[in-house]
Image: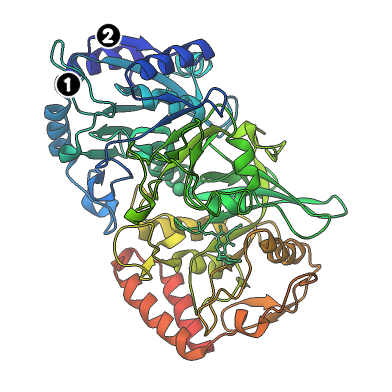
């Protein structure tokens, strides 16, 4: 592994910053950088939320950029058909040109960080070099950042290097913009064999906070493949029944399915309790007892704001009352934040995410649909006591969920691990207005990992199958598919969702300890019954209807999709598909 100081020197010579700042992660450092951002007009302190700031990005820099995201493995076939690829040497040459002198007039921040609890066997160390003070502060909230991580890096002589620049050098005396970025030359690049990250041109979210999607998913998925563990796009929650028995569940959902809401669920079932380990990423490996254990590598939430309210997610609302950064939300004249769905009606005198007086007649949203809050996870009132357990938490169940208005029932249990891997590989979701492109179109997103797998997705499926062969059925978590989004003939949602999902979690909880009955269907096991006490009329027949014609079509579609992965598509999953076809 590279020596930290020689790497910093090399990158500084390439980027030519005016100053270099090695981050210690202290509160004082956070406050100094935030103050400078207030001076520079990037941050606005929020009168209604202590130690919190509002900011907005360039309108061209509002989301991850999949079209500019690359996996530069030595061989193109190791990146697979679902990733962009370029030969590493060619990409390196391109990047060196882009990064050459890109930090002139700026400060180069060295951000040492740890993903996972500091002394956990799961922990992975990283160093992000960035010229974005916004990235530094977000990394402080989202990771274990600073001196302690640096000490571990020095001791272990190991870290994942990540270079990031907004890509806008400043001439002497030139005034900076409030959100510098270089949208025309964006590159989010991963070198899986070298285990390094280079990100140019964007200051937003996953493009700039390299610990999150770049390290904890794309690079970590490669490490997991090589070392026999899993890096997953999953929430982790703890669930306790009325007699005090506790279990842990991990769940993968594509975007716009309410992953953060489920991670922080307030159960409507009396006596049940849910606590939050993580809302986005799970690193999962076997313990000595043959069970799978999960840690959340992150230390904060970078959550989508719109739709978050005291009704949909009271715990998130209580988490973001202080020490938060709000990006691209609207703000009120009295120094608070607002977004669509936060309250039924918009406050008067709103300032939109673009920092102009909001005109409700414009029919544009006041907050950007991908606007975010960044906040420390430990502020969550239901932060799980075991969330920082260095050994992780033992998983009893793994859920795969999508937004499907038809076909997929409310909940279904896989016959076994292999059938569960088939559930994961089959995951798809209907697009919403929040994403660009056509609304209501079915998009495949196997394991909710399509944008985040750092290698060939066919090999990834094979890795999941191999993990299942390392233990026994009684020790492995049971696997479920869930779908909160079924609609009736009238176009209305059939299931109330949100806190009522605790009724589905109850069935799953009890299934994993042989306390609940199930009926066998061609696809898997469905509940014999659910506790529906206190709910209005629920059309259980529609929620659990399995339409053979629709399922045959689903099989046709999956067969076409799986063909994309060619010879790397595991036979076992094609066999699952054939078995399902026969059973229908
Ligand atoms: O997050 C959601 N969850 C999971 C909650 C733990 N959402 C929001 C998705 C967008 C991010 C849901 N939306 C859920 C859900 O379970 N279900 C639905 C669909 C739905 C929306 C509104 C109602 C019912 C279902 N009810 C009324 O409008 C009264
Ligand atoms: Mn995510």
Residue 545 placement: quadrant? bottom right
Residue neighbourhood size for the residue with mark 2, other residues' Cα within 10 Å, grouped as few (<14), some (14–19), many (≥20): some
Taking the spot 24% from the left edge, 15% from the top edge, the residue there is 106
Q: Is residue 3 visible?
A: no
Residue 289 shown left or right of residue 241 in the figure: left
Taking the spot 69% from the left edge, 39% from the top edge, the residue there is 384
| Ligand 2 lies under 8 Å from the Cβ of mark 1 | no
Q: Is residue 507 above or below residue 304?
A: below
Taking the spot 49% from the left edge, 30% from the top edge, the residue there is 335
Q: Which residue is mark 1?
A: 169
| Element under disc 1 | loop
The x and y percentages for residue 272 are 79, 54
Residue placed most toward the observer, 350 or 467 = 350
Instruction: Looking at the image, tell me whether mark 1 or mark 2 is earlier in sequence order.
Output: 2
Q: Which residue is mark 2?
A: 19
Residue placed most toward the observer, 188 or 303 = 303
Taking the spot 35% from the left edge, 15% from the top edge, the residue there is 39
């Amino acid at each position: 592994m590279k020596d930290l100081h020689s790497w910093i020197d090399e990158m500084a010579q390439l980027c030519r910053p005016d100053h270099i700042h090695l981050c210690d992660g202290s509160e004082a450092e956070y406050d100094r950088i935030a103050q400078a951002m207030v001076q520079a007009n990037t941050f606005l302190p929020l009168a209604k939320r202590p130690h919190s700031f509002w900011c907005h990005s360039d309108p061209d820099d509002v989301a991850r950029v999949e079209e500019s995201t690359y996996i530069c493995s030595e061989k193109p076939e190791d990146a697979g058909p679902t990733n962009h690829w370029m030969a590493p040497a060619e990409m390196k040459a391109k990047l060196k040109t882009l990064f050459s002198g890109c930090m002139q007039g700026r400060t180069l921040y060295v951000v040492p960080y740890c993903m996972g609890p500091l002394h956990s066997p799961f922990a992975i160390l990283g160093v992000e070099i960035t010229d974005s003070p916004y990235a530094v502060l977000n990394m402080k909230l989202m990771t274990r950042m600073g001196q302690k991580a640096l000490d571990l890096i020095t001791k272990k002589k190991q870290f994942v290097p990540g270079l990031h620049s907004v890509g806008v050098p400043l001439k002497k005396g030139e005034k900076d913009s409030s959100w510098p970025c270089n949208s025309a030359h964006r590159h989010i690049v991963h070198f899986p064999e070298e285990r390094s990250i280079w990100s140019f041109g964007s200051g937003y979210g996953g493009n700039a906070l390299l610990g999150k999607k770049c390290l904890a998913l794309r690079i970590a998925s490669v490490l997991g493949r090589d070392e026999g563990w899993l890096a997953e796009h999953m929430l982790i929650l703890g669930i306790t029944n009325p007699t005090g028995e506790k279990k842990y569940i991990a769940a993968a959902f594509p975007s716009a399915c309410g992953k953060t809401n489920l991670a922080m669920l307030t159960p409507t079932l009396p006596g049940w309790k849910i606590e939050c380990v993580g809302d986005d990423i799970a690193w999962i490996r076997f313990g000595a007892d043959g069970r799978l254990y999960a840690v959340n590598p992150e230390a904060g939430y970078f959550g989508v704001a719109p739709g978050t309210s005291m009704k949909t997610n009271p715990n998130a609302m209580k988490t973001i009352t202080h020490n938060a950064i709000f990006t691209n939300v609207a703000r009120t004249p009295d120094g608070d934040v607002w977004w669509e769905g936060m309250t039924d009606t918009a406050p008067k005198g709103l300032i939109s995410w673009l920092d102009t007086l909001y005109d409700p007649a414009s029919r544009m949203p006041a907050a950007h649909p991908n606007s975010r809050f960044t906040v420390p996870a430990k502020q969550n009132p239901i932060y799980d006591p075991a969330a920082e357990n260095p050994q992780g938490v033992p998983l009893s169940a793994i859920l795969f969920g999508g937004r499907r208005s038809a076909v997929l029932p409310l909940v279904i249990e896989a016959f076994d691990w292999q059938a569960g891997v088939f559930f994961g590989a089959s995951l798809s979701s209907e697009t919403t207005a929040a994403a660009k492109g056509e609304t209501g179109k079915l998009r495949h997103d196997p394991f909710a990992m399509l944008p985040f797998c750092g290698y060939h997705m066919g090999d990834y499926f094979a890795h999941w199958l191999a993990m299942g062969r390392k233990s026994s059925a009684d020790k492995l978590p049971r696997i479920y598919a869930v779908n909160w989004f079924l609609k009736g003939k009238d176009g209305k949602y059939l299931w109330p969702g949100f806190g009522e999902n605790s009724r589905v979690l109850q069935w799953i909880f009890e299934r994993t300890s042989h306390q609940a009955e199930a009926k066998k269907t061609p696809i898997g096991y469905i509940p014999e019954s659910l506790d529906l006490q206190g709910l209005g009329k629920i059309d259980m027949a529609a929620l659990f209807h399995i339409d053979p014609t629709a399922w045959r079509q689903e099989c046709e579609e999956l067969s076409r999709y799986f063909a994309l992965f060619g010879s790397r598509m595991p036979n076992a999953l094609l066999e699952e598909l054939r078995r399902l076809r026969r059973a229908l």
